[in-house]
Image (cartoon, helix red, strand yellow):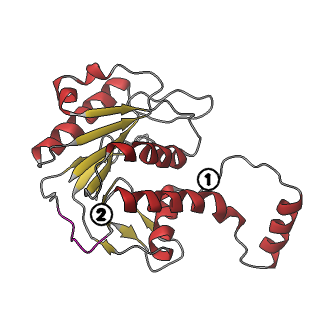
Amino acid sequence: MIAIVTSCVHPKQMPNLTRSFFSLEERERQTIHTLQRLKEVGFTQIILADNSFEYDFSRLGPIIDEVQVVHLKQYQFTNKSINEIFILLSILEHIPSETKIFKISGRYFPSENFVIDMEETLDFKVKGFEFDTKRAVITTRGYFIRNKETYEEFLLYCLNEIYSYPYRVVGFGSLIRFIKEFFNPSLKKVPNVSVEFAAARALKNGYFKYKLTDQLHIEGQIAGLESKELIKE
């Protein structure tokens, strides 16, 4: 199994948008810890997929020599979910066929009870929330995937959901808006649908075999929360 770490160690600062309450040095320490923990729990192949605007990855120290770094300079969407999907699609070429994948977000890390394991019959193993409702989401901080072929189909499905969901027709009012938009496109800004929501819809509405798990046994702190609350999932 291969581990993919999606990361932005050094995010580009954007006007009127706080992307992180962590300093560069804090993000570096957290990323180093993520990579070290992945090695400790048994991953022998790790890809760090990072979309920092500018960054010298040697700052991460000796651990970086044991990691394949794929640096992608991207346009920074305000909806970071779109950036993450494009990152993951871009690195599929670096993954061998028919190889299981564990995806984890940068600065999160496997905790004590983490196990590298996914049943052969599954396409995905994820942690979901309110999965029997229309508000269903999955955590994209960490999850398991059958292989890159399955992953590509899933990611494209997610991207389609992000862009198409705001234009769904669920009643007379939304039908009128759809018709108006069809004949007079407003060229709206990037949709704010999250990848967590889109991914849940992809699993529930697609042709994927998935398993919901109560615990993935990963931990970390959310960069966008000033309180820097520790998350355990």
Q: Position of residue 64 (x, y in %)?
A: 22, 28
Estimate the x, y position of residue 136 in percent, counting from the top left: 48, 71
Q: Is residue 57 left or right of residue 111?
A: right
Q: Secondary structure at mark 2?
A: loop
Q: Is residue 231 visible?
A: no
Provide the secondary structure element on which disc 1 rests.
loop
On screen, residue 187 above or below 116: above
In this figure, what is the number of numbered marks?
A: 2
Q: CA distance from mark 1 to mark 2?
A: 28 Å
* Amino acid type, mark 2: Arg
Few, some or many C-alpha atoms within 10 Å of disc 1 (few <14, some 14-19, many ≥20)?
some
Q: Residue at x 64, y 57 (%)?
A: 163
Name the magenta segment's main secondary structure: loop
Q: Earlier in the sequence, mark 1 or mark 2?
A: 2
Between 126 and 95, which is closer to the camera in this rendering?
95
- When asked about the image quadrant of residue 97, the answer is bottom left
Residue assigned mark 1: 192
Residue highlighted by disc 2: 146
> What residue is rendered at 78% in x and 71% in y?
174
Magenta stretch, residue numbers: 117-122
Residue at image coords 25%, 30%: 29
